[in-house]
C-alpha cells in the first residue's frame, strides 16, 4: 500500500493486516521503553489545515514511537495563511524528502490531490466531509479488541451523517468487516442516496434495541443556524443517547470531542458501555500500524548510503 | 433572420473552394450523398456530381472519405474578455471555435466587468473584427453588473449590437426583476437567455445531489433547483408573451418542465451541452476538478432524459458552455475549484464517439442540433443548401485522437475529455466561403 486515502480503497484483508500489526504495537506500548527504531532517519510531515487534538497528537506520537523525525505544520501561522496554494505548500515540504505526509484539510479530495505533487506516501487524516480512514480503522480495532469477531454484528451510527467524514469511512470499514450498519438521524442530516454505501437508514431510534453497538456522531452547533434542525433541544429529545435508550448490553462509541448533553448524556459517557477512551488509546497503535504499513521496508532514507553501496560517496565516508 | 457572417469577425477575400468527393450530410438540405461542394462568392454554388465541375480559379480540396457538414453554431461560450484574458480572449476562443468546426459563436457577458453598457458591446465588436477567426456575437447582461437588481439599458444595448440578454453564470433570482425584463423585451427585442437555478436551493452545492454526493461527502445541487426555476420563468413568459431561451438543461425534471411549457405554447427554446449528454456524476467519484461545472453532471437517468429530449426536439440545440479556466483555478480541491469546462474543440468528436458511433442517435440529428443554436438568436441556421452562405466543415470520421495530447487552440486546458480517445477530427472549417481553420496534417496534405 502506497497511500492511505480512503477506506473505499481497502478490502477486508488490508484492514485485518493493519489490525494485526496494531496488536503487535500494543504489546510494545506495554514495555518500559515504548520506542522502536523502525522509521529511524525518515521524516513524517503532519500538515493540518483544520484544528485537531486527538488525530494530530496521535499521529505525532505514533511517528515518534517509530523513531521518525517529525515536522508539524498547522495552518494558523503558516505560509498557507499568507495565501500560498496547497500545491506550493506541498512542493515546499516535499523538498525535505519526507517519507510520509499526513494531511487534514477542510476539502474533500485534498489528500488524493497532493499525491500528484509529492513522492511521499500520503495519509488522509480527514478531507472535508469525505473520509477519515484512520478513525475508521481505529474504531474497527477498538471493537475487535472488545468483541473479537465482527461478522454479523449490528451497529447504529446516529446523528449528523451528512457532515460526517467519520460516518462515511465507518460505514465502509464496518461493511467490509461484515457488520450490518444502520445510519440514523434527522432526515435533514441523512444525505439522499447514502444507502448506496450498503447501509440501512432510520429516522427514529425506535429500533435502536437491535444494535450491538451505538456509534454517536458529534452534533455541531452551527447546524442549527442552517435550518437542519430547529433546536438542540428538539435534536436531543429525538436523538440523544442516554441511559433510557442505551441498554447495558450495548456498546457505545463516539469519535470525539463529545458535546455532553447533546448527542450523549453524561451518564452514558462514563458508563461501562462506553468505549470512548479505548478509542483514543487505539488511535495511537493503529496509526503506528498505518505508518508501518506504508513506510516500513519500502525504500530507505534518501541520501543515506545503502548498506551494500560499492560507489564511494561524493562527500566521502562519514568519519 | 441575419446571416451568420453579419456577426463580428476578421473577414478576408477568398477565391472559393471545391470540397471534392466528401459524404455530404445536411438534413436541412435533404442530402446524404457523395458530392463536390462548390463554394463561390461566399455561397454554396452547387452540390455537384463528383468530378463534374472544373476547378478553374477555385481551390480544390481532396475530401474522399471525409464528411462535409454544415458548420456548427454555438450560442453559448465564454470568451473571458474583458478581464480574464489569461483564461481566454477573442482570438484564442474563436480559434478554438474554428478548430471545433464552428462558423459562429455567441459570447456570454459575465466578464469582469460584466457587459452592461453600449460602449462595452461596441468595443467587443470592434475587437472581434480584428481578432476573431469566426463570426462572434456578444450578449449583454439582463441586470446591471449581473447583480440581479436593476435592468440594463436593454434597448440601447440591442441597438449597439448585443445579440441577446443573459445573466449567465447566475439566475435572475427575483421574479419581479425578470418579469420587468420580459415586459421590456417588447421595446428592446432580443431573446432572454436564462441560467435556471434557485440559488437558495443550490446553497453551497458543488455537484449533483445523489448517490455519488452522498458517498464522497460533497454538498449536492438538487435537480429541482433547476426545474422549479424553469417552471417559474416559463409561466411568466407565457403571461408576458416573452421569448426565452433556457441555457444548459441538465436534469430529467428540466426536460419535462420544458416539454410541458412548449406544449402550452410558451415561446421557449432550450439547449444542452455535450458533457451533460455524455458524462454523469459518476465521474465526480474521482474528486477531479475537471468534472466540476454548473449545472453539474447528473445521473444516468438524467442523461438519458437529455438524449431523449434531444431526439424529440424538446431540446432545440447543443451548446458547449465553453468555460475556460486557468490551471491554478482547477489545481485545487474540488470544492474550491472554479466551475466550468472547455468544449469547443471536443463537442463534435465527443458526441460522435459517444452517441453516433454506438447508434444512440443518428448523425443527421447531431448535425441538426449542432447548427440549430443560431435560430433562437435570429441567425440563419448553417446549411449546405445551394444559395446559402457557405458555412461548412470537413471531418475525418475515421481519425482517432487523444483529446488534449497535442494541446489546444484554447488558452485553457480544463477539458473534461482530456485523455479520452475520440473518433472524428475536424480538418477544415469554412465560414462564408473563407477558410477559417485547417488542421495541420490536412494542410500539409493539401500542399503536397
Image (cartoon, helix red, strand yellow):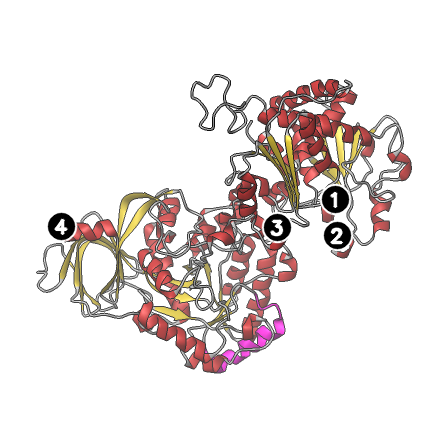
| Discs 4 and 3 carry the same chain letter | no
* Image marks 4 and 2: residues in contact by CB distance under 8 Å: no
Name the subunit of mark 2. Answer: A
Magenta region, residue range: B171-189
Q: Is residue B139 above or below residue A91?
A: below
* Image marks 4 and 1: residues in contact by CB distance under 8 Å: no
| Residue under numbered circle 3 | A80
Residue visible at 30% across and 70% down? B5
- Mark 3 Cα shell of 10 Å, populated few (<14), some (14-19), many (≥20): some
Q: Secondary structure at mark 3?
A: helix
Residue B448 image label: 4
Q: CA distance from mark 1 to mark 2?
A: 9 Å
Name the subunit of mark 1. Answer: A
Image location of residue A292, percent across then percent down: 62, 24
| Residue under numbered circle 1 | A160
Q: Quadrant of the N terminus of chain B?
A: bottom left
| Residue under numbered circle 2 | A228
Amino acid at each position: 500500500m502506497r497511500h492511505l486515502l480512503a477506506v473505499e480503497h481497502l478490502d477486508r484483508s488490508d484492514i485485518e493486516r493493519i489490525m494485526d500489526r496494531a496488536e503487535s504495537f500494543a504489546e510494545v506500548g506495554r514495555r518500559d521503553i515504548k520506542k522502536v527504531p523502525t522509521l529511524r532517519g525518515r521524516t513524517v510531515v503532519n500538515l493540518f489545515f483544520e484544528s485537531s487534538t486527538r488525530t494530530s497528537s496521535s499521529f505525532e506520537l505514533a511517528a515518534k514511537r517509530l523513531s521518525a523525525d517529525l515536522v508539524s505544520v498547522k495552518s494558523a501561522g503558516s505560509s498557507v495563511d499568507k495565501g500560498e496554494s496547497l500545491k506550493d505548500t506541498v512542493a515546499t515540504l516535499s523538498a525535505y524528502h519526507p517519507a510520509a505526509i499526513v494531511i487534514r484539510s477542510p476539502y474533500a479530495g485534498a489528500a488524493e490531490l497532493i499525491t500528484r505533487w509529492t513522492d511521499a506516501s500520503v495519509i488522509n487524516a480527514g478531507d472535508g466531509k469525505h473520509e477519515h480512514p484512520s478513525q475508521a480503522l481505529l474504531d474497527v480495532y477498538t471493537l475487535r479488541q472488545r468483541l473479537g469477531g465482527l461478522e454479523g454484528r449490528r451497529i447504529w451510527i446516529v446523528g449528523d451523517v451528512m457532515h460526517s467524514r467519520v460516518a462515511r469511512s465507518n460505514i465502509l470499514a464496518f461493511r467490509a468487516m461484515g457488520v450490518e450498519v444502520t445510519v440514523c438521524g434527522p432526515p435533514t442530516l441523512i444525505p439522499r442516496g447514502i444507502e448506496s454505501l450498503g447501509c440501512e437508514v432510520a429516522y427514529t431510534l425506535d429500533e435502536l434495541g437491535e444494535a450491538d453497538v451505538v456509534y454517536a456522531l458529534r452534533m455541531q452547533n452551527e447546524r442549527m443556524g442552517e435550518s437542519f434542525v430547529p433546536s438542540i433541544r428538539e435534536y436531543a429529545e429525538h436523538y440523544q443517547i442516554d441511559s433510557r435508550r442505551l441498554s447495558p448490553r450495548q456498546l457505545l462509541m463516539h469519535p470525539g470531542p463529545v458535546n455532553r448533553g447533546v448527542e450523549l448524556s453524561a451518564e452514558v459517557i462514563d458508563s461501562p458501555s462506553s468505549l470512548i477512551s479505548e478509542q483514543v488509546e487505539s488511535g495511537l497503535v493503529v496509526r503506528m500500524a498505518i505508518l508501518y504499513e506504508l513506510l516500513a521496508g519500502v525504500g530507505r532514507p534518501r541520501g543515506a548510503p545503502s548498506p551494500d553501496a560499492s560507489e564511494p560517496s561524493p562527500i566521502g565516508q562519514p568519519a | 433572420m441575419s446571416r451568420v457572417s453579419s456577426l463580428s469577425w476578421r473577414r478576408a477575400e477568398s477565391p472559393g473552394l471545391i470540397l471534392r468527393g466528401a459524404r455530404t450530410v445536411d438534413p436541412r438540405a435533404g442530402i446524404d450523398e457523395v458530392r463536390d461542394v462548390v463554394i463561390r462568392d461566399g455561397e454554396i454554388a452547387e452540390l455537384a456530381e463528383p468530378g463534374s465541375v472544373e476547378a478553374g480559379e477555385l481551390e480544390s480540396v481532396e475530401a474522399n472519405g471525409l464528411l462535409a457538414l454544415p458548420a456548427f453554431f454555438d450560442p453559448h461560450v465564454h470568451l473571458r474578455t474583458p478581464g480574464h484574458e489569461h483564461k481566454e480572449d477573442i482570438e484564442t476562443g474563436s480559434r478554438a471555435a474554428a478548430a471545433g468546426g464552428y462558423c459562429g459563436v455567441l459570447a456570454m457577458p459575465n466578464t469582469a466587468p460584466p457587459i452592461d453598457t453600449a460602449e462595452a458591446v461596441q468595443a467587443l465588436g470592434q475587437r472581434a473584427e480584428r481578432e476573431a477567426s469566426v463570426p462572434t456575437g456578444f450578449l449583454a447582461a439582463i441586470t446591471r453588473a449581473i447583480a440581479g437588481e436593476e435592468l440594463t439599458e436593454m434597448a440601447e444595448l440591442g441597438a449597439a449590437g448585443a445579440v441577446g440578454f443573459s445573466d449567465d453564470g447566475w439566475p435572475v433570482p427575483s421574479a419581479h426583476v425578470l418579469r420587468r425584463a420580459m415586459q421590456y423585451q417588447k421595446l428592446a427585442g432580443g431573446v432572454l437567455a436564462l441560467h435556471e437555478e434557485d440559488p437558495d436551493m443550490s446553497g453551497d452545492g458543488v455537484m449533483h445531489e445523489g448517490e455519488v454526493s452522498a458517498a464522497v461527502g460533497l454538498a449536492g445541487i438538487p435537480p429541482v433547483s433547476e426545474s422549479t426555476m424553469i417552471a417559474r420563468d416559463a409561466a411568466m413568459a407565457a403571461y408576458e408573451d416573452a421569448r426565452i431561451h433556457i441555457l444548459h438543461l441538465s436534469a430529467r425534471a428540466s426536460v419535462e418542465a420544458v416539454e410541458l411549457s412548449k406544449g402550452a405554447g410558451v415561446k421557449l427554446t432550450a439547449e444542452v451541452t455535450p458533457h451533460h449528454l455524455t458524462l454523469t456524476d459518476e465521474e465526480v467519484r474521482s474528486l477531479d476538478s475537471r468534472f466540476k461545472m454548473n449545472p453539474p453532471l447528473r445521473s444516468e437517468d438524467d442523461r438519458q432524459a437529455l438524449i431523449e429530449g434531444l431526439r424529440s426536439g424538446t431540446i432545440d440545440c447543443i451548446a458547449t458552455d465553453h468555460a475556460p479556466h486557468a490551471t491554478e483555478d482547477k489545481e485545487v480541491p474540488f470544492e474550491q475549484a472554479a466551475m466550468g469546462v472547455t468544449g469547443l474543440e471536443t463537442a463534435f468528436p465527443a458526441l460522435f464517439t459517444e452517441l453516433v458511433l454506438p447508434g444512440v442517435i443518428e448523425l443527421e440529428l447531431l448535425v441538426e442540433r449542432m447548427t440549430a443554436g443560431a435560430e433562437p438568436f435570429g441567425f440563419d441556421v448553417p446549411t449546405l443548401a445551394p444559395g446559402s452562405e457557405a458555412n461548412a466543415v470537413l471531418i475525418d470520421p475515421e481519425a482517432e485522437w487523444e483529446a488534449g495530447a497535442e494541446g489546444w487552440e484554447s488558452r485553457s486546458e480544463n477539458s473534461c475529455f482530456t485523455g479520452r480517445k475520440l473518433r472524428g477530427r475536424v480538418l477544415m472549417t469554412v465560414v462564408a466561403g473563407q477558410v477559417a481553420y485547417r488542421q495541420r496534417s490536412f494542410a500539409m496534405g493539401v500542399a503536397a
